[in-house]
Image (cartoon, rainbow, N blue to C red):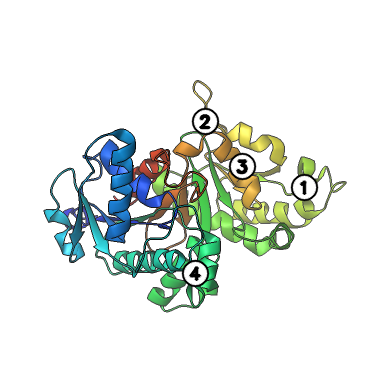
Amino acid sequence: MTTSDMNKPILITMGDAAGIGPEIIVKAFQACPAELVGCVVLGDVAALRRASALIAVHTQTPAWPVAQLDSLADAAAVPPRCIGVLQSCDLPTLPPYGQISAQAGQAAADCIVRAARAVLAGQARAMVTAPIHKEALAAAGGWAAAFPGHTEMLQAEAAVYLGKPVSEVPVRMMLANDELKTVLVSIHLSLRRAIEAVTFDNVLQTLRITYQAVSASLGRAPRIAVAGLNPHAGEGALFGSEERDIIAPAVAAALAEGLNVQGPFAPDTVFMRARNAPGKPGEFDVVLAMYHDQGLIPVKYLGVEQGVNVTLGLPLVRTSPDHGTAFDIAGTGRADASSLLAAIRMARQLGA
C-alpha cells in the first residue's frame, strides 16, 4: 500500500441508531483519540450528537464534539478530539433507544452501502461496521429487507463492483480475538439448512478462502484445524457419516493442493486445542467450523469485548465488533466500546 493509500480514511458505519452503535463510536473516540485520527463515521449527525450528549450526562463530562463533513475529502481537516461524521442516510426522527424501527433499519443499510462503495472506489482504506438489528432491517422492506445481515449485503455490493453474479463472489465470516480464530462454512442459516450446507464443495471452498486470507494476515501459511459436524466427529460414522463422506474428503483435497489442514476433529475439543493461551500456544492458527454457533460460541465465551468479525473473500477490508445492538442497554450509557476498538485496530492492520 502506498503512502497515499495509508492517508485514506477508515470508515465506521453508525449501525442501528436505536442500539448501542452511536454510543460505542463516541466512546471509542473518547478512549483513544490518537488511534482514531483518520477515521470517519458514516451515519446520522443527530444520532451521533444524541449519543455524545448521553455519555456526557452519564460521565458528567463535556459532550464530545461532532462535526458534519461535506465529503470524505474533509476528513483530514477534522480537528483533534472531534468526531467527523458524513451524513449518509435519511433519518427524519431519531428512533427511541431499544425499539425496532424500520427507519433505523433503512438508515443503517444506507450507511453500509455508501461505505462499501467508497472503499471499493478507492476513497477509503477499510470499513468497520457498528451493529445492525436484523429485524429492523427486515422491517425496512425493499432492497434492505433482502439481506439477513452485513455479510450478504457486502457480498452483493462486491459482486456488482466486480461485474460477477453473487454466486461467484464467495465470502465467509471469521471471528477472531487474541486467543482463537474461527471461520464458518455457513453464516446466517437455520440449523437445518446449515447442516445441509455442509457439502464437499462448501467445505473445500471455505478452506481455500481461509488459507488465502489468514496467510495474508500472518505472513505465512496458516495451520488450519477442521471441526467435525457430529458429536465426536461422527465416531467412525456411528453418530453421523458427514465426516467420513464429506468433510474428510474435502480435507484430503485441500491437502493435495498444499494447504496445511488437519481434521475433522471432535468439535467439543478442537477449539481448546487451537486456543492460544498465555504460556500455552495453540496447536492451530484457525479452526474451520461447520455452522454459525459452533464457531462463534467458543470465541465469544473467551470475551465478547475483544472479539472481531472479519468478512473474508471480499475485495475490501471489513471488520466489526462481535456483538449486537444490545437493545436492552441502549441509551443507558453502559455499552463497552472495546470490541469496536479491536475491530478498528484490525481494520487498520489488514488495510495496511
Residue at 54% over, 57% down? 208
Instruction: Name the residue beneath numbered marker 3.
Output: 297
In front of the other: label 4 or label 3?
3
Q: Distance from label 1 to label 2 (Cα)?
A: 25 Å
Q: What is the three-letter code of the residue carrying label 2?
A: Asn
Report if residue 261 is visible in the image.
Answer: no
Instruction: Name the residue beneath numbered marker 4.
Output: 169
Q: In the figure, 155 relative to 299: above or below?
A: below
Q: In the figure, 339 relative to 142: above or below?
A: above
Instruction: Name the residue beneath numbered marker 2.
Output: 276
Q: Secondary structure at mark 1?
A: loop
Q: Distance from label 4 to label 3 (Cα)?
A: 27 Å
Q: What is the three-letter code of the residue carrying label 1?
A: Asn
Q: Nearer the viewer, residue 124 or 212?
A: 124
Q: Earlier in the sequence, mark 2 or mark 3?
A: 2
Q: Distance from label 2 to label 3 (Cα)?
A: 16 Å
In front of the other: label 2 or label 3?
3
Going by the picture, which residue comes out furthest to the right? Answer: 238
Residue 294 in the figure: left or right of residue 173: right
Q: Earlier in the sequence, mark 4 or mark 2?
A: 4
Counting every numbered tag in the picture gives 4
